[in-house]
Image: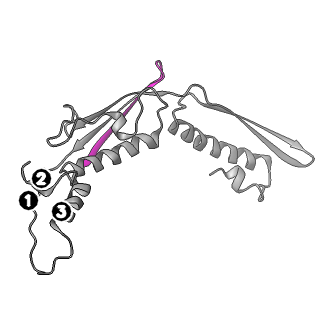
Amino acid sequence: ASDLITLQKRPPASLNGIRYRIAGDIPEMLKVLKAFGYYDAKIDSALSLENDRALVTLSIHPGPQYTLSSYEILHNNCQETGLFACCPPLQPSDLGLTLGSGAIAYQIVNAELLLLTQLSRCGYPLAGISKRDVIVDMQSKQVEAACCVNEGPLSKFGPLQMGGNEKEVLEKEDLEAIAHSLFGGTSKDRSEV
């Protein structure tokens, strides 16, 4: 949030107070611009008095938007490519990322959440991200991102067994369909992993 905007109805006693607010706002604005891939952004400010009112002008020069050139999924040691038993190889597009498009921070973070969801569906419910690497190349205007995954143990699900209530509410096929929608396969498939 901008102090210039939120505090505009409470003007400071002097122009130096306004300069202080400008100096506080610019770094925060630059952080937002970098989060959207504008690493070369610059912000110029001008302060003038008109009719006993201070007029602040901020000129934002975003520069080029840096692009995401690569996204790697690595094992916990951050050395080997992350290939996980029972999971198809995951590509950046499977995680909502498009290589060559703008390097947007929240999309990179969301990719990690989608990765953990996918790993959970493949039998790794305890998977976690142990490290994130983001390298910004100021010369090529590209961003390389990687995450290191600690997948945890592979969880196997045994065959479906029903007991207790003699009057079944759900048929076995219905439960198999539920297992398929939750875990990407039947309980029998999971027991054979």
Q: Is residue 15 above or below residue 99?
A: below
Earlier residue among tags 1 and 2? 1
Residue type at tag 2: Arg
Q: Which residue is mark 3?
A: 173
Q: Is residue 138 left or right of residue 81?
A: right
Earlier residue among tags 2 and 3? 3
Q: Which span is picked out in magenta?
A: 128-142
**How far is disc 2 from disc 3 in space, using C-alphas?**
16 Å
Label 1: how many residues lie within 10 Å, few (<14), some (14-19) or many (20+)?
some
Residue type at tag 3: Glu
Please say whether residue 36 is visible from this viewpoint. yes
Helix, strand or loop at label 2? It is: helix
**How far is disc 3 from disc 1 in space, using C-alphas?**
16 Å
Residue 140: in magenta span = yes
Q: Nearer the viewer, residue 79 or 15?
A: 79
Residue 77: in magenta span = no
Whether label 1 touches label 2, CB < 8 Å: yes
Label 2: how many residues lie within 10 Å, few (<14), some (14-19) or many (20+)?
many
Helix, strand or loop for the magenta stretch, by majority: strand
Q: Which residue is mark 2?
A: 190
Helix, strand or loop at label 1? It is: loop
Q: Position of residue 50 (x, y in %)?
A: 90, 43
What residue appears at the point 21 percent right and 45 percent down from the top-left corner? 150
Mark drawn on residue 158: 1
Residue type at tag 1: Gly
Mark drawn on residue 101: none
Whether label 3 touches label 1, CB < 8 Å: no
What residue appears at the point 46 percent right and 40 percent down from the top-left corner? 105
